[in-house]
Image (cartoon, helix red, strand yellow):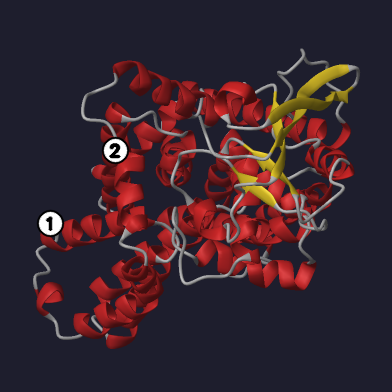
């Protein structure tokens, strides 16, 4: 498919323009919680990590080595992945009926889904799976048509890379096996060509296995508790999870995703039917998980990445009312997404104190500069935070200073592995914020607790965050 051919030019120019816009925006927006965390992976290269497999860190290392360890370098990979993923989605829809307009509208629907405008600029493990899921689907169809060693090896590589990206990639195996069984292609399960594919996949994910052997399988244990960590159903959390997805993926496009799943399940197109099996497995798993633990909206992003475009395609085949609904949904989503990008760049929308779009991504360079102004003796003094979300940004924005920084909490996580020194006996300058407040006197054992600084992070005369810095002299542990 030649993207510069006349029928594809509108699509190609659109995704190129959006990618260029994202590249222009990237250096002017501070890193969020997860973004900063995965850049820390790149700064602390390892075989794997406590909370995720290593590919996100390895990719960040490659791109930040080329473009610099800064906001721009941290985002180039996600922007490139967003561009390539858009091509895969376009191909998926275009291959159905060779209608470039249908394919372009489907991609527009994806760009009108709010969360993808964030995930295509922030590199996360989910972003890597966006790049891999459609090649996996295409390769399974290729194996069905041509049971060759080359296709099996390609599938092994893709599944290995998916496993190196995120643990939930193990779910990819289920729809592949289901598809083979439903199609009664039992020969594909017994072919000796499957063995090299399995060996290749195992070799690619071997760093994860080795790291877990070295670290008492802590990553597997953490993930099993992280996704489904409660013993009883939490209906309140379930409906919060559902509401978060409803808002995050555009409330008007949200139902179209399930319409697309329904239609694809009955499709005679093998690629759409296999995609439906993937979607059914993914959304079933995360719906089940949401019953026990409030699910973050990006956990189910793979489902919506596939089925907002597929649902849009089927909406175009329906009556004029559904078409009008689709066009309105896309226009609404693109308008709000463009407005959000403009706000990130120019900070012009009036917002109430502490409710700004910038509250998680603005001000940490200032916070760490001010914190280091209070560090006089780097042998005796250090900086501390009390929550991991603060730690990821604090450590990243502290990287150009010589001071030590500790996370002081009871939660077992990646920071325990990274921290080589012991904070006991040090004078800790503890940073707390409006969103993560702590009574240091009752939380930490100190000879003396003294407030040394307090200030607000301001945009357009509105408080984005409030910061307190408290000195804990001779820290001796938690209360």
From the image, state whether disc 1 or disc 2 is nearer to you.
2
C-alpha separation, residue under disc 1 versus residue under disc 2: 29 Å
Residue 99 shows up from this direction: no
| Picture quadrant where residue 432 is located | top right
Residue 76 lies, with reference to residue 118, above or below; the image says below
Determine whether the residue tagged by mark 2 lies in a helix, strand or loop.
loop
Position of residue 416 measured from the top left corner of the image (x, y, whole percent) = 51, 53
Count of labels in the image: 2
Residue 103 x %, y % = 53, 50
- Which quadrant of the figure has residue 162? bottom left
Q: Which mark is residue 469?
A: none
Residue lying at 49% horizontally and 65% vertically, measured from the top left: 54
Q: Which residue is mark 1?
A: 182
Give the residue drawn at x 23%, y 81%.
Answer: 147
Give the percent coordinates (x, y) of residue 440. Answer: 63, 26
Mark 1 Cα within 10 Å, few/some/many (few <14, many 20+)?
Answer: few
Comparing 186 with 300, the one in front is: 300
Q: Is residue 69 above or below residue 245?
A: below
Which quarter of the figure is the N terminus placed in? Answer: bottom right
Q: Kindly state the secondary structure of the residue where label 1 is placed.
A: helix
Front residue (pair 13, 345): 345
Who's the residue at 60% across and 66% down the image?
A: 44
Q: Is residue 294 above or below residue 14?
A: above
Residue 116 visible in image: yes
- 215 relative to 266 in the view: left or right: right
Residue corresponding to mark 2: 228
Taking the spot 50% from the left edge, 59% from the top edge, the residue there is: 417
Q: Position of residue 392 (x, y in %)?
A: 63, 47
Residue 369 lies in quadrant: top right
Q: Is residue 263 left or right of residue 81?
A: left
Quick one: 83 or 362, which is closer to the camera? Answer: 362
């Amino acid at each position: 498919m030649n993207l510069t051919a006349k029928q594809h030019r509108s699509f190609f120019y659109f995704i190129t323009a959006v990618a260029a816009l994202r590249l222009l925006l990237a250096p002017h927006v501070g890193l969020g919680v997860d973004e900063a965390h995965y850049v820390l992976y790149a700064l602390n290269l390892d075989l794997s990590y406590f909370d995720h497999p290593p590919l996100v860190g390895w990719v960040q290392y490659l791109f930040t080595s080329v473009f610099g360890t800064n906001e721009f370098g941290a985002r180039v990979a996600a922007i490139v992945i967003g561009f390539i993923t858009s091509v895969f989605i376009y191909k998926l829809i275009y291959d159905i009926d060779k209608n470039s307009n249908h394919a372009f509208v489907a991609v527009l629907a994806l760009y009108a889904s709010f969360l993808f405008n964030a995930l295509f600029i922030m590199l996360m493990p989910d972003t890597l799976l966006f790049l891999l899921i459609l090649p996996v689907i295409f390769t399974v169809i290729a194996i069905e048509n041509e049971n060759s060693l080359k296709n099996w090896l390609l599938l092994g590589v893709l599944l290995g890379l998916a496993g190196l990206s995120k643990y939930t990639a193990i779910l990819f195996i289920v729809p592949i096996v289901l598809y083979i069984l439903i199609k009664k292609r039992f020969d594909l399960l017994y072919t000796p060509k499957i063995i090299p594919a399995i060996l290749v996949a195992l070799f690619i994910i071997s760093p994860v296995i080795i790291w877990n052997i070295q670290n008492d399988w802590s990553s597997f244990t953490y993930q099993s508790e992280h996704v489904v960590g409660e013993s009883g159903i939490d209906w309140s959390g379930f409906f919060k999870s559902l509401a978060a997805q409803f808002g995050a993926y555009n409330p008007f496009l949200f139902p179209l995703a399930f319409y697309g799943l329904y239609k694809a399940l009955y499709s005679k197109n093998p690629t759409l039917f296999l995609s439906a099996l993937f979607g059914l497995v993914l959304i079933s798993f995360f719906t089940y998980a949401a019953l026990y633990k409030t699910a973050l909206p990006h956990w189910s992003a793979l489902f919506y990445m596939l089925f907002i475009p597929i649902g849009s395609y089927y909406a175009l085949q329906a009556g004029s009312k559904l078409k009008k609904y689709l066009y309105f949904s896309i226009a609404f989503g693109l308008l709000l997404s463009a407005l959000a990008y403009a706000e990130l760049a120019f900070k012009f929308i009036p917002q109430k104190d502490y409710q700004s779009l910038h509250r998680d991504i603005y001000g940490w360079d200032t916070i760490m500069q001010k914190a280091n102004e209070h560090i006089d003796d780097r042998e005796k003094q250090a900086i501390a935070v009390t929550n991991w979300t603060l730690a990821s940004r604090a450590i990243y924005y502290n990287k150009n200073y010589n001071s030590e920084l500790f996370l002081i909490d009871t939660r077992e996580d990646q920071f325990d592995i990274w921290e080589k020194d012991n904070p006991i006996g040090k004078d800790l300058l503890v940073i707390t914020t409006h969103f993560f407040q702590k009574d240091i006197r009752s939380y930490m054992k100190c000879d003396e607790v003294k407030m040394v600084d307090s200030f607000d992070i301001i945009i357009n005369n509105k408080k984005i965050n409030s910061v307190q810095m408290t000195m804990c002299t001779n820290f001796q542990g938690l209360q």
